[in-house]
Amino acid sequence: MGRDYFEELDELNGTWSTAIAWRPGLLESMAALQRRLTDLNVYFVGSGGALALAELAALEHVERTGLMATAITPLQLDAAGSSNSLRRTAVVLFSARARHPDVRVVGLLGRSRSAELTVLVTQVPEEELSPQIARAFDEIHSVPRTPKDGFLATNSLVAIAVAWLRAAAVELPAAPHGLNVATPGYREPPRRLLVAFGPEQRPGAIDLEARLSESGLADVQLSDLRNLAHGRHVGLARRASDTEVVVLAGPTSADLATRTFGALAEIADPVRFDSPHSGASGALDGLLYTMRYFGALACNDRVNPGRPSVLPAGRRLYHLRTRPTLNSSDSVRHILERKMRAAGDLFTDSAARTRWVDALSEWHDTAAHREIRGVVLDYDGTCCESSARFDPPADQLKEQVERLLEAGLRIAFASGRGPSLLQSLRQWIPSRHWPQVIVGMYNGAAIHPLSDDVHRQTDPEGDLKGAVEILSDLRDDSWVVDVRRHQITVTASDAAPGRLLALFQCALAREPALQVRVVASGHSVDILLRDVSKQRVAEALGCGRGNTLTIGDRGDLGGNDLELLAYGPLSVSVDKVSPDPMRCWNLGAPGQDPSDLTRHYLAAVKVRRSGARFAWALPSSRRVSEGVQRGNEAG
């Protein structure tokens, strides 16, 4: 199994030289991701050798932004978010091959707990990933492939690390010290290793622990340079004869390392590595050294760790599928969690949880007994993914829309888009149904039957003219500003819509006050006249507030579906929700694809002789309470 580990080490210089010379354009999308992470806390996730990569990324993020970043395993991510929202937090997973079952779990965990961004960084091109994994993440960033790794990650880890740090504008040396400094010569392999490290060398220490533990070459203990002083020296003294001590340091910890090294020399014969580089660059330097240092130990022990013998039990362990919170049979728990996060309630508050159980049951009873005469659908992010908004929806969703039209229901589509939406809808809605369909463009500013021909108008009306002037003062070269008569749309490759939303809301509040407002979608920020909203589309459908089912993806404060999903009691979200207990519930499974959830919502509209009803099954209030309580006790 695997490749020759020593051949992999010989290839590291070539991998470094290749990665350090990658064109900036190759890393452009990853650099844009780094800029979007600038104002977010981040969980960097990795398993095995990739955990060292997560540590490196966390160190760089804290150093650059001053915000929180934590390196954790997939199972730790489940625990970290089980009762907490991941709002204002991103989840970034490193996995070179993206084959392990935990990869998809991480994506689903991030998306189900309202993470601002859930990202996979891998060496597998997106088109080669399984659809289940690709759909679980908001973004996938693929680093060019390098020489294949054996049992232990080497070249892939270095390539991804270099790409990540270069995208973050970290200066890296052409010839890193860790690739060239000598490692210890032949000596009897130790039974134990104590690795003492400075703060910037933690990634290298984690890497060495993974290699030693996975190969079984030696027992290993990790300790930072100061924690070592709290009793660990006593254990070292008792086991000094069969323990080797490795000290990893950098410029910020050099003095402490020197004094620690001197004290340790009285107990053992320590090995020391000092990187001349600080911060993330020095951390990567130490990572390169630990790969080579481990190779020297393996050579001394006459084993090739790239080709281990893996027992059947080991293969079963690798392929075990975890059952995180999101796979709980009590799916209603997650419905409640979404609402409680939106309302700022903690799920651990039993009194608040009981109130929300009652609210869900009351809303569900109301929705189930209302006759549905019309349906209003947001389009981008609801009927199709925002990234594929110019493609037709999935066939199964189109079939549900046509089913309801055949049954005589009226349907409206509400979108921030302009006349291009008319053209998209005409491609798949049969012309015989066009009289039943209306289209609300520019977030409801322009409402027309599907059969109308509408042309773009680029001269802004009213106070939108003043908004254009303010935007020109704020203008960033990375923004794309599209000015139309009814709306200004801004997209930016290096900023999440939420960041632009806050900026524009503040800037447009300047005196003299403009009669405009700002809303966000999954891919852009729109500036509208104050009296414009998608709720106008629902009113234009003419089916009545209590008899119109509304479906959208951004029902949160500042979202462009907020008013639409507040229109009447028959409102459901496929993504973000409001804290209103009688509107805007998300009934989907954790991590469910939004457009797939839309299809399920439409399929739940059952047409009978007495009229159409929303037949979505939920347990009774008593069963919900009991199920949630059992879930809490199990957790």
Image (spheres, grey):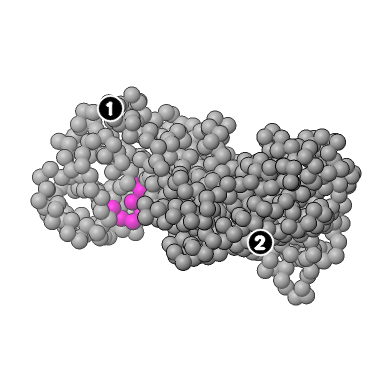
The secondary structure that most of the magenta stretch takes on is helix
- Taking the view exactly as shown, the residue that stands out farthest to the front is 610
Label drawn at residue 311? 1
Badge 2: how crowded within 10 Å, few (<14), some, or many (20+)? Answer: some
Residue 97 location (% of width, % of height): 45, 33
The residues tagged by marks 1 and 2 sit, at their Cα atoms, a distance apart of 54 Å
Of 59 and 87, nearer the camera is 87
- Taking the view exactly as shown, the residue that stands out farthest to the top is 1
Of 438 and 305, nearer the camera is 438
Which residue occupies 68% across, 66% down? 505
Q: Is residue 115 above or below residue 452?
A: below
Disc 2 target residue: 558
Q: Is residue 440 left or right of residue 326?
A: right
Badge 1: how crowded within 10 Å, few (<14), some, or many (20+)? Answer: few
Q: Is residue 198 magenta?
A: yes
Residue 26 location (% of width, % of height): 57, 39
Q: Is residue 590 magenta?
A: no
